[in-house]
Each structure stands twice: as C-alpha cells, then as structure tokens.
C-alpha cells in the first residue's frame, strides 16, 4: 500500500472511532432502551372509556391464590354493570353465588360457602368498600393512587398495558392493584388485587361489551325463602 493511501485509511478509521465514541457518550448508561409509556395518560384514557359506557357486560374468570393457606381457587360467571350504582356478578361455577348492587344496597349471597345467609349492606361509595372491581380503580385514580407503568402484555389475543396502582390511603383492604388496559379501546380487561390478607385476586373479563341493553331485573335481588338476612350496614 502506498504511504498516502495508508495515511488516508488511518484518518478515516480515526474519524469513525470518534463518531462511535461521541455516540456512546450521548447514550445513557442504561443503553438504547425505549422510554416507558406514560402511565398517567393510559390511566386517563381508561377513565374516559369507562365514562363513555352506560352499561358493561362480560364473562369473567376469577382466580384467588392464598400462599398462607395454600389454596388456589378458580371460579367463573357473568359480570354486568349499569352505571351509576348498579352491577352484578353472577357465578355459573359455583352456580348460584351472586354479588349485586341495586343502587341502594349491596347484596352478597354465596350459597357455595354459606347457603343459609345473605349479607346486605348500604352502598357507602367510600374507597375500598366497592365490590365493583372496575369502578373502584377508575374513580379519581390520580388523587387516590400512585400510578406506574409495569409492562406490555396481552389478555387473550388483545394487547394491553399493565399499570400498577398503589393506594395513598393506608387503611384500605388491598395493598396494590394491577390493571390491564386494552391498547385499542382503553377498557380494563383484567384486574389483579393484592389483598391485605395476603391473597391475590385476579379477575379477567372476556367478550366485553359496552352500551348494550340489560334488563332492569338483572339488578334486583330477592333473598331466597328461609335464608337469614344479615345487615352489615352498621
């Protein structure tokens, strides 16, 4: 190689090395990883999507894991909601279990565990006392929770963003919730609640439909004959 050609090659190599060095200096120590999505913006879209819905209807699967007791139970049924104030979870497995809010009272009848008892309580609207596991985490969430982005995931075949919500109030019956927000329509498709007892409750919604007609009778409950009604409002 001629001396001039060697010199030009060395000069080009130095320039390339300088460019690489400049790039490395500009990149943070964490590398070229993409910035996490804005958790607050995703949460705002979820609130707006719920506020656009007058009714919700879906199949649900609930899984409750309790490491202290060594239990892992799965149940399923139908979730229905008419906003505001009316919703029902009606189990197909175990058949007959129901949690229902009629706009005035909350009824809990779980014959699989307590066949001779119905618990009735007033709808206080206080945080942590709502059995509506969707509305509970989308009611003024920025004021009530510390929100962060966890990861991208899927529910069934639908892409979703997972958010962590840690309550600012210390005396709630749960320590943290994860919500899966659909990337297409911003509806919540899954909720996972870490309860104060140590149990983890995960509820997944399938075939979620909004603004469909739901008969008014869906949100009425009449205690079965011979069943004791316990008033838990006091």
Image (spheres, rainbow, N blue to C red):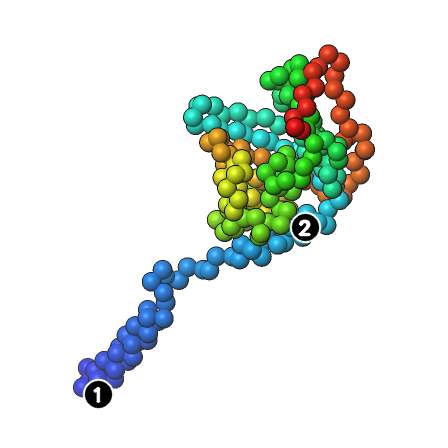
Image point (49%, 25%), residue name: 72
Nearest to viewer (mark 1 / mark 2): 2
Q: Which of marks 1 and 2 is nearer the N terminus?
A: 1
Which residue is outermost to the front? 234
Residue 227 in percent (x, y) is at 71, 14
Image quadrant in which the C terminus is located: top right
Contact, CB < 8 Å: mark 1 with mark 2? no
Residue 221, by quadrant, is top right
Judge whether residue 199 can be spotted in this image: yes
Which residue is outermost to the top? 226
Q: Mark 2 points at which residue?
A: 49
Image point (47%, 27%), residue name: 66
Q: Between residues 141 and 218, which one lies in front from this camera angle?
A: 141
Badge 1 marks a residue whose secondary structure is helix
Q: Viewed as shown, does residue 153 lie left or right of 211? A: left
Disc number for residue 16: none
Q: Name the residue under label 1.
A: 4
Residue 165 in percent (x, y) is at 52, 46
Q: Is residue 1 above or below residue 111?
A: below
Residue 4, by quadrant, is bottom left
Image point (59%, 38%), residue name: 128
Residue 74, by quadrant, is top right
Image point (69%, 35%), residue name: 123
Q: Viewed as shown, does residue 58 lie left or right of 163? A: right
Q: Judge the density around disc 1: few (<14), some (14-19), many (≥20) Cα neighbours within 10 Å.
A: few
Number of residue marks: 2
What is the spatial separation of the Cα atoms under label 1 and label 2, in whole angstroms? 69 Å
Q: Between residues 183 and 168, which one lies in front from this camera angle?
A: 168
Residue 57 in percent (x, y) is at 71, 37
Q: Judge the density around disc 2: few (<14), some (14-19), many (≥20) Cα neighbours within 10 Å.
A: some
Q: Viewed as shown, does residue 186 lie left or right of 214? A: left
Judge whether residue 206 can be spotted in this image: no
């Amino acid at each position: 190689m001629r001396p001039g050609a060697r010199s030009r090659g060395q000069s080009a190599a130095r320039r390339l090395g300088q460019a690489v060095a400049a790039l490395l200096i500009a990149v943070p120590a964490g590398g070229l990883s993409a910035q996490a999505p804005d958790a607050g913006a995703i949460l705002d879209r979820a609130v707006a999507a719920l506020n656009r819905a007058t009714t919700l209807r879906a199949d649900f699967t609930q899984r409750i894991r309790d490491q202290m007791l060594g239990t892992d139970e799965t149940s399923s049924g139908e979730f229905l909601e008419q906003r505001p104030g009316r919703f029902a979870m009606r189990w197909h497995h175990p058949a007959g279990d129901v949690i229902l809010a009629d706009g005035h009272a909350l009824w809990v009848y779980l014959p699989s565990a307590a066949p001779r008892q119905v618990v009735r309580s007033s709808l206080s609207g206080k945080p942590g006392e709502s059995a509506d596991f969707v509305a509970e985490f989308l009611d003024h969430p920025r004021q009530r929770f510390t929100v962060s982005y966890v990861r991208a995931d899927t529910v069934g075949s639908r892409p979703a963003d997972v958010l962590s919500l840690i309550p600012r109030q210390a005396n709630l019956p749960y320590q943290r919730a994860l919500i899966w927000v659909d990337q297409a329509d911003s509806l919540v498709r899954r909720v996972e609640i870490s309860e104060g007892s140590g149990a983890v409750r995960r509820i997944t919604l399938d075939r979620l439909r909004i603004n469909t007609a739901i008969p008014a009778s869906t949100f009425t409950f009449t205690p079965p004959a011979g069943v004791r009604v316990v008033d838990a409002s006091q």
